[in-house]
Image (tube, rainbow, N blue to C red):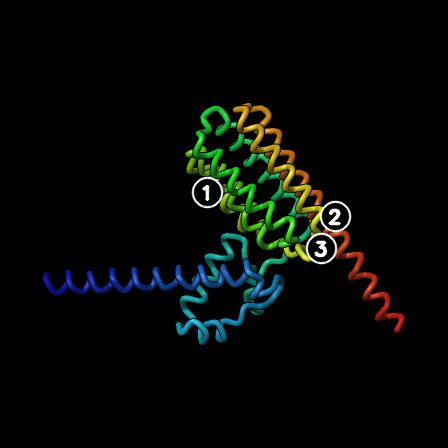
Amino acid sequence: MAEQEESTARSTIALLKSKSLTQVVQREIERMILSGEIAAGARINENALAARLSVSRAPIREACRALAELGFVHLIPNRGVFVKSLGRDDVIEVYDMRAGLTGLSGMLLAPVVKRSHLVTLDALLGEMKEAAYASDYQGFMGVNNRFHLFIVEATGNARLARMYEGLLKEFQLFRRHGLVGKEVLLESLQEHHAIVAAFKRRDAKACYEANYRHVQNGKKRILDAFDLFDAKRAAVSARASGA
């Protein structure tokens, strides 16, 4: 009996270690994808990753399966694992969902917003302003993500927060930031000011509209960036063909 219990305990510990290792590997691959270290559309080299992370291929495979369920990668039979590359339809779907969730978050928080919430939002606006005037897109988007996630989490609605965090990760897969200039960041900054102003009035309807409109405007900006990127790529291709 004791031997059986000991064997069961060892099996349980081994399973926990395996799961823990897979989660660590998954977080690292996710970080590499979101940072652009592994580019959109690129194939994930299991052998190279296993060597880099000093693990076997098993946790790499398990992590990739989990990331496929989250929408980060595609598992293509007989070809391998590829980082998902998001197009116009993906942009529209993700932004429409984010618009609804951020609007709802604003509406829920407005009637119960605390002074401490407003202090935090004002501080984030200050950080955003610095990044915008420095034309620091990465810095601006980092604060932008914290700003909206703070509002969502401040509602206290755990299900809403989980849904939003999932969309936020997909949102970070968009790779057109090189086309976003200072004027666009300043435009977005003004929209964030309008959101905070609505919270200070504790106006639920205005908070919904300001949050929803801001994300829809963001959708238009990113789609414009897609169009500009495609036009530049077509022009380069045409020049190369002419040469």
On residue 162, which mark appears? Answer: 1
Q: To which residue does mark 2 refer?
A: 224
Q: Secondary structure at mark 1?
A: helix
Query: Where's residue 191, x and y in %?
Result: 64, 37
Above or below, 229 relative to 219? below
Residue nearer the viewer, 166 or 220: 220
Q: Of marks 2 and 3, which one's residue comes earlier in the chain?
A: 3
Q: CA distance from mark 2 to mark 1?
A: 29 Å
Q: Residues within 10 Å of mark 3 (few under 14, many from 20)?
A: some
Badge 1 amino acid: Arg
Q: How many marks?
A: 3
Q: Residues within 10 Å of mark 1 (few under 14, many from 20)?
A: few
Badge 2 amino acid: Asp
- C-beta proximity under 8 Å, tags 2 and 3: no
Q: To which residue does mark 3 refer?
A: 179
Q: CA distance from mark 2 to mark 3?
A: 9 Å
Q: Is residue 38 left or right of residue 88?
A: left
Q: Secondary structure at mark 3?
A: helix
Residue nearer the viewer, 115 or 80: 115
